[in-house]
Image (cartoon, rainbow, N blue to C red):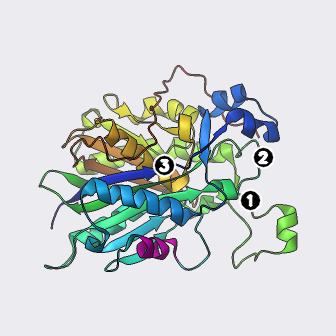
């Protein structure tokens, strides 16, 4: 089967920068508290006229430019999101139309913050099995606007999230490069740890659900931390064993940008002692399904990875879901691949102060 890898990357972050002081005022916490608990200093917020598809389109266009492709060369457009423009149609259909990907099948994936890695595996398998003469390129986008579903009086969640989109173009790559193995894990028994309880068929929106605030995002922070702490090191180790790759051979680790303090606490347990840890959450916070592709795009813009470098992606989110990918980086450094929103990844170490979000 044809090797499939990432051949283009792009991201889009809204212009508005929201400080910890602005977020903390409504939630009753300080800038110092937010930084100490999360490692986050600021985040981006979508403009009132922007929807998730708008962010996704901008990231997609940059990724296509990075790959040197046009939209009509795409076989698939897949958007990973848990904050779609509408319940239906799929946000991907709107993106497909606006970028002119007229030959592409378009659909959404919702595995919450793990959605990008779930979509990555889906499109990789579809492209690898394509028949001769069929298009061999796909667009995988992570995009979320969590600012529309947050309760800004809830200090457990108000400071954690930002808005943004990241995109990757997948296509044929040389042998020895590209996606090697992807593991997807779901633990539905823990689905209550992260949820929006109203707005669907179980509890349709009503005056009462709005009054009760049940359309807001809710999270059991301690429960999520426990799930990730128990699950992520084991699943990364299992993936590497199956791929017959030593942990110290991994050169780059790109995690879901959930909470910098939690990631600092986990880092020593992952065994990736020679890997560079890429974080963008200090400036962008947790952008949901967009966080991994946004960070990949930042990594590429800086020329941090060379072709052939071993990279591990790890995302986790509601469901509960987990997606881990191992790949050999397949792009040359392209200084113009990203657009206008650089960030400096901040490396948190085990020496940083750590602690769970207070209830």
Q: Which mark is residue 154?
A: 2
Mark 1, secondary structure of its residue: loop
Reading the image, the residue beneath label 3 is: 291
Which residue appears at 61% of the width and 27% of the height? 354
Image quarter for residue 84? bottom right
174 vs 53, left or right, is left
Characterize the magenta stretch by its predominant secondary structure. Answer: helix
The residue stretch that appears in magenta: 90-98
Residue 41 placement (x, y as % from top left): 61, 32
Image quarter for residue 160? top right
Which residue appears at 17% of the width and 57% of the height? 173
Query: From what the image shows, is residue 145 above or below residue 209?
Result: above
Between the residue at mark 1 and the residue at mark 2, the CA separation in whole angstroms equals 10 Å
Residue 190 placement (x, y as % from top left): 61, 58
Reading the image, the residue beneath label 1 is: 216
Q: Do the residues labelled 1 and 2 touch (CB within 8 Å)?
A: yes
């Amino acid at each position: 089967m044809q090797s499939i890898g990432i051949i283009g990357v792009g991201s889009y972050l809204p212009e508005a920068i929201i400080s910890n002081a602005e977020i903390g005022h409504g939630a009753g916490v300080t800038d110092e508290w937010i930084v100490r608990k999360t490692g986050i200093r600021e985040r981006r917020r979508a403009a009132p006229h922007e929807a998730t598809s708008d962010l996704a389109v901008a990231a997609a266009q940059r990724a296509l430019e990075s790959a040197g492709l046009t939209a009509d060369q795409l076989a698939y457009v897949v958007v990973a999101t848990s904050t779609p423009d509408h319940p239906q149609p799929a946000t991907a259909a709107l993106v497909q139309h606006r970028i002119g990907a007229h030959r592409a099948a378009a659909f959404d994936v919702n595995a919450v913050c793990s959605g990008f890695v779930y979509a990555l595996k889906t499109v990789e398998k579809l492209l690898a099995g394509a028949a001769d003469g069929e298009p061999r390129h796909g667009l995988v986008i992570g995009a979320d606007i969590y600012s529309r579903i947050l309760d800004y009086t809830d200090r457990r969640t108000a400071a954690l999230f930002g808005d943004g989109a990241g995109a990757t173009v997948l296509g044929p790559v040389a042998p020895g490069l590209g996606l090697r193995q992807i593991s997807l894990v779901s633990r539905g028994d823990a689905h209550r740890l992260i949820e929006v309880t109203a707005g669907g068929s179980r509890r349709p929106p009503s005056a009462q659900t709005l009054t009760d605030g049940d359309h807001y995002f809710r999270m059991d922070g301690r429960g999520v931390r426990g799930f990730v702490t128990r699950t992520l090191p084991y699943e990364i180790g299992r993936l590497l064993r199956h791929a017959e790759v030593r942990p110290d051979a991994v050169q780059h680790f790109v995690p879901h940008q959930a909470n910098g303090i939690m990631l600092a606490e986990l880092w020593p347990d992952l065994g990736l002692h020679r890997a560079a840890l890429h974080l963008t959450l200090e400036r962008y916070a947790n952008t949901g399904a967009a966080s991994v592709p946004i960070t990949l795009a930042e990594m590429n813009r800086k020329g941090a990875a060379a072709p052939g470098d071993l990279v591990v992606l790890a995302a986790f989110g509601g469901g509960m879901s987990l997606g881990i990918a191992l790949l050999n980086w397949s792009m040359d450094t392209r200084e113009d691949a990203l657009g206008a929103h650089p960030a400096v990844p901040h490396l948190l170490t085990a020496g940083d102060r750590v602690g769970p979000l207070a209830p």
